[in-house]
Amino acid sequence: MEDLNVKKEEIRVWGIHCRDDVLFRKENIIAIGWKDMGDLSILGSDREAFKKRYAEVYKDAKKGSVANGAGMLYRFCNEVQIDDYVVYPSKSDRQVNIGIIEGEYQYDATQPEYVQTHKVKWLKQFPRTYFSQGALYEIGAAQSFFMVKNYADEFLAALDKGFRKPRIEDEKEVVEATAELIIENTKDFILKELSRQLKGYDLEEFVADLLRAMGYRTTVSPHGGDSGIDITAYKDELPPRILVQVKSQDGDIKETTIQSLKGAMREGDYGLFITLSDYTKNAKAYLRNTPIIRGINGTELVDLVIKYYKDLSEKYKRIIPLQMVYIPVSKNLFE
C-alpha cells in the first residue's frame, strides 16, 4: 500500500448502491441500470449527447432529473478510471466493501437490469461499525453512483495495516450536525412539496385536513366566496369560532391582508392566518398587537405537519411521503 500513502490526494473514490448484493461480489463488477439508454460508449464524451439521449428515453423526466441522471451516467462511463477505488455498502449483510477498478466501461447486454459495468477487484470487506457516522452518511447518498469526497481518506485508510476504527467520542459533533442536516432537509422537502403541489383551493383543503388531525372540526368555505374566510373551525360543539384564511402566494403577507380577515370576524371569534411564505415587518407588528389572530408562516406550518403527520389523510401522505425513522441526537436533550 506504499503508493496509496504517497498519492492519496490523487486517488478518486466512488460510491455505489445496488439492490442485487450478490451480483457485485459474484461477478467482480460494479454496475448500474438504465438499460434503455443502451451502450453509453456510443455517446462518446459529449455531455450534451448524454442529456439529449436521456430526455429522449425518459420523456416524462423533469429538467432537473435529466441533468442529474445524464450526469451520473456520463461519470460512470467517462470519468471512472482504472485504479480508482469504489466503496459499496451491501444492505443484506450490512458490510462495506472496498475495491479497485480494473476495467474500462462495458455495456453487458446479458445482464437483465444492471447493464452498465466496470470490472472490479474487491480488496476488503468491513462491518459498518468500523467507520465513523459521517463516513456512513456519505456513502448512504440518495444517488446510485456518486463520488466520495468528504470521507474518502477514511475509507482508503481502512485498507492500511493498523487501521483503527474511530472512537465514539470523536464522532459526537459529526453525528449531531448530520442529524440536524437531515431534519432541515426534511423540512425543506415538505415546504417545497406544499408549494409545488398544493396551490389555492388545494392548500385550503390540506389545511382543513391538518386542523382536523389536530383535533378541530372544520368546514371549508365554498370556492369563489367573497367573505375572505377559507375555513371555519371549532375545537368542539361550542364557541369560540375560528375563522381561517389561507394564502399560497410566494410573497410575504402584508398588514392590509390580515386586516381583511379581522374585518370578517364577529365578536367572540378568533382568527388564524396561514401562509407558505412569511409576513412583512408591519404585518408581524399587527399580529403582535392583535392577539385574537394567530399568524402561521411556512416554517411553522411545516413543524405542524411533522408533529401531526401520522393523523393526516392518506391522500396527503401520498403527496408528502415521509417515513418515521430514529436519528441520533445530543445527549443534552435528555439532561
Image: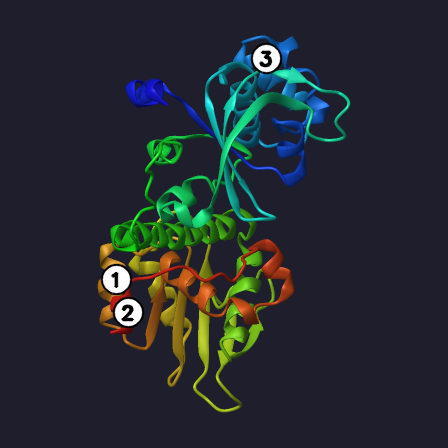
Residue at the disc numbered 2 = 333
Q: Secondary structure at mark 2?
A: helix
Q: Secondary structure at mark 3?
A: helix
Label placed on residue 213 = none
Horizontal and vertical percent for residue 235? 48, 84
Q: Nearer the viewer, residue 1 or 325?
A: 1
Q: Secondary structure at mark 1?
A: helix
Q: Kindly report the distance in space between the C-alpha atoms of the residues bearing marks 1 and 2.
A: 31 Å
Q: Quadrant of the C terminus?
A: bottom left
Residue at the disc numbered 1 = 284
Q: Residue at x 59, y 60 (%)?
A: 317
Q: Residue at x 39, y 74 (%)?
A: 271
Is residue 88 among the parts visible in the rendering? Answer: yes
Horizontal and vertical percent for residue 39? 68, 15
Farthest residue to the front: give it: 161
**Left or right, residue 8 beside residue 84:** left
Q: Kindly report the distance in space between the C-alpha atoms of the residues bearing marks 3 and 1.
A: 51 Å
Residue at the disc numbered 3 = 49
Q: Amino acid at mark 3?
A: Ala
Vertical placement of residue 183 versus 34, above or below: below
Horizontal and vertical percent for residue 190? 47, 53
Q: Amino acid at mark 2?
A: Leu
Query: Which mark is nearer the camera, 3 or 1?
Result: 3
